[in-house]
Amino acid sequence: MQSPEPLLCIVGQTSAAAKVILRILQGCNSLQRLHKIHAHVITTGLQHHPAISSKLLHFCAISVSGCLSYAQLLFHRLQNPLTQDWNSIIRGFSDSPSPLSAIFYYNAMVSAASDSRPDTFTFSFVLKACERVKAQSKCKEVHGFVIRCGYKRDVVVCTNLIRTLHNQLDISSHLNTIRKNVKNDAEFQLLTSDRDQVVVDAVKQINRNLTMAAILALFVMTFAAVFATSVADPDLLQDVCVAELKSAVKLNGFTCKDIANITSEDFFFAGLAKPGPTNNTFGSLVTGANVEKIPGLNTLGVSLSRIDYAPGGLNPPHTHPRATEIVFVLEGELDVGFITTSNVLISKSIKKGEIFVFPKGLVHFQKNNGKDTAAVIAAFNSQLPGTQSIGATLFAAKPEVPDNVLTKAFQVGTKEIEKIKSRFAPKK
């Protein structure tokens, strides 16, 4: 599949030097020559020119053999990658020995806070990567996103969906459900094209007599019935993906450590075995056991914490934006609660051996009102649930939240706000 070249249409708006460089890039066929062109781009001050930077990335990722690592370097230097930039890096990896990286970049694109959204080519490239690594769950997730983005009738996307699913599943049973209504497959063969023989062979299992639009709609409805739309984190695509915490590549998660370098220590942590010190302002201590402490948790979607409380200790009101929390009391008694978005407090006193759940994203707390110490084990459905303590978030943010925002929000004066901020200031 040949991606369109939207960059060429804006060449007429570029400088003469940019035009020359873009023409030279058209004939580039080696990594050494590409390095020379890139060096010339930098010396002429055109490295931030959108057409040139995108074209360089395109050639590194797709046209020049053995240049994907250089393409990654160029991509991560882009401040605001365009859709065609994401497509170049995803397409490059989908054809490479590391198709899983194409899925990682697709995840990053979907999660990025930018105007660059997946298009026909994005979906086609990531579906190819899913087919190569046999990522059935990811294919289902992409299919859901295709529907939400309005591409469910796109000929190219639907063709790739059918081919990918045919290679992963026995779809003949789903095709047979519409056997009675179909008599001629000529139009659908034209849709899928001769080069997609795998799809054509699957379609030939039944006789069809529907228009192209009706067939596409029927296929989309069939697959939608088989695969519920998924909006959760992507499933594990291999046995393990131990987090490479020091990697310079930034994704929605962590890149995987080389399997040859994995040890048992990547899956072990002894930090929850003993109580932590609670001689602090709040009289409590949270000891996390997340992916930053146990790299082997990467992509597994779980983590733990141990929380210790002194008598009267408090785990102050906070939220976990990426996870639901469930606590099991090891010892002592606690008053716990969370607040709904309707400002309703749901609270209860719990003791040793009992469990309480805090829904994802809602403000919650735990307070030891007893005379003895207390402790809980907290479990999360995220490898890195994140924590936002309400007080510290508002009164210890850097840069500071403006006083006029806080005074109006809390209906108090500036002196009161400054006094509260001083309580959250780091102790010297």
Image (tube, rainbow, N blue to C red):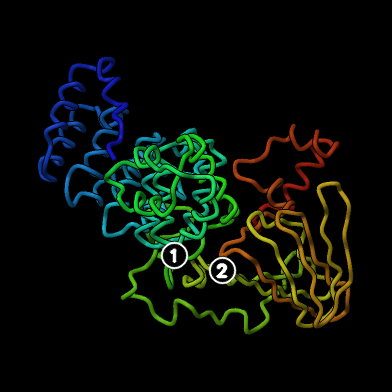
Residue 231 visible here? no
427 relative to 333 in the view: left or right: left
Name which of mark 1 and mark 2 comes first in the sequence.
1
Measured as percent of width and height from the top left, residue 258 is found at: 33, 69
The residue under the point 80% across, 39% down is: 415
Amino acid under disc 2: Asn
The secondary element bearing badge 2 is classed as: loop
The secondary element bearing badge 1 is classed as: loop
Label of residue 108 in the image: none
In the rendered image, the vertical position of residue 181 relative to residue 427, given as above or below: above
In the rendered image, the vertical position of residue 89 relative to residue 235, given as above or below: above
Measured as percent of width and height from the top left, residue 47 is found at: 26, 32
Measured as percent of width and height from the top left, residue 226 is found at: 57, 56
Q: Disc 1 versus disc 2: distance between alpha carbons?
A: 20 Å
Residue at the spot of label 1 = 237
Residue at the spot of label 2 = 290
Task: For the C terminus, give its image quadrant.
Answer: bottom right
Measured as percent of width and height from the top left, residue 21 is found at: 17, 27
In the rendered image, the vertical position of residue 9 relative to residue 203, given as above or below: above
Label 2: how many Cα within 10 Å (few below 14, some 14–19, many 20+): many
157 relative to 424 in the view: left or right: left
Amino acid under disc 1: Leu
Residue 278 visible here? yes
Label 1: how many Cα within 10 Å (few below 14, some 14–19, many 20+): some
Q: Residue 278 appears in which quarter of the rendering?
A: bottom right
